[in-house]
Image (tube, grey):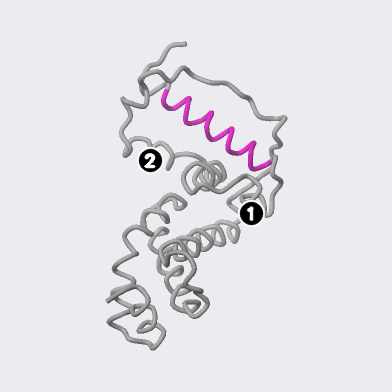
Amino acid sequence: MNETELIKKCLNNDTEAQSLLYNSYAPKMFGVCIRYADDYETARDYLQEAFISVFTMLHTFSGIGSIEGWIRRIVINTALQNLRKTNIIEYKYELNDADFFEYRTEHIIETISAAELVKMISTLPKGFRTIFNLYAIEGYSHKEIAKMLDISVEGSRSQYSRARKSLQKMIKEEYDIHI
């Protein structure tokens, strides 16, 4: 069954099609959720809430672009809505407050596994982690992030800079890099 047929069946409340859609995209979308959540339970809650929205809003999918991209956007928005509800994300720093520095990175990337990097990112404070995920992993611009989170572009840049600084420090300490 192709994607268009699957969507039509889901819209007709075909539970087998809905299950197939969920099972096809849930594992990848759980990976998105876990980047924004502190733990697996919270990530599962985000995923469940996002898929409720997916099935509720499926009639609005225009067919332009991939269904996976459309679902990903709902998942990200669901995670961000939950973070905003709990006032976890605080954006009080401006760009001129940020400390900028760079560590030498020769051969570091070759040393760090993806799993180690994901683990380090997961230890960042929620605000830093959220901005880092949206910018570095999801590919949103600082302007788009600012609009999504109702913050200034400078605030987004500052949070991203601080996230990078924190990651650099973790890498420096983990791999005993001397400057």
**Above or below, 29 relative to 9:** above
Query: Quick one: SS at disc 1?
Result: helix
> 65 or 60: nearer the eye?
65
CA distance for labels 1 and 2:
23 Å
Q: Would residue 160 be counted in the magenta stretch? A: yes
**Above or below, 50 relative to 116:** below
Give the labeled residue for mark 2.
118
* Amino acid type of the residue tagged 2 in the rendering: Val
The 10 Å Cα crowd at callout 1, few under 14, some 14 to 19, many 20 or more, is: some
Residue 21 is tagged as none
Where residue 117 sits: x, y (%)?
Answer: 37, 36
Q: Which stretch did the figure color magenta?
A: 155-171
Q: With 29 as the anchor, is 146 left or right in this view?
A: right
Where residue 98 sits: x, y (%)?
Answer: 66, 29
Where residue 14 sits: x, y (%)?
Answer: 33, 86
Residue at (45% x, 53% y) in the render: 37
Query: Quick one: SS at disc 2?
Result: helix
What secondary structure is the magenta-colored segment mainly? Answer: helix
Looking at the image, tell me whether mark 1 or mark 2 is earlier in sequence order. 2
Please state, as top left, top right, bottom left or bottom right, where the N terminus lies in the image. Answer: bottom left
Residue at (31% x, 39% y) in the render: 115
> 74 or 47: nearer the eye?
74
Give the labeled residue for mark 1.
149
* Amino acid type of the residue tagged 1 in the rendering: Leu
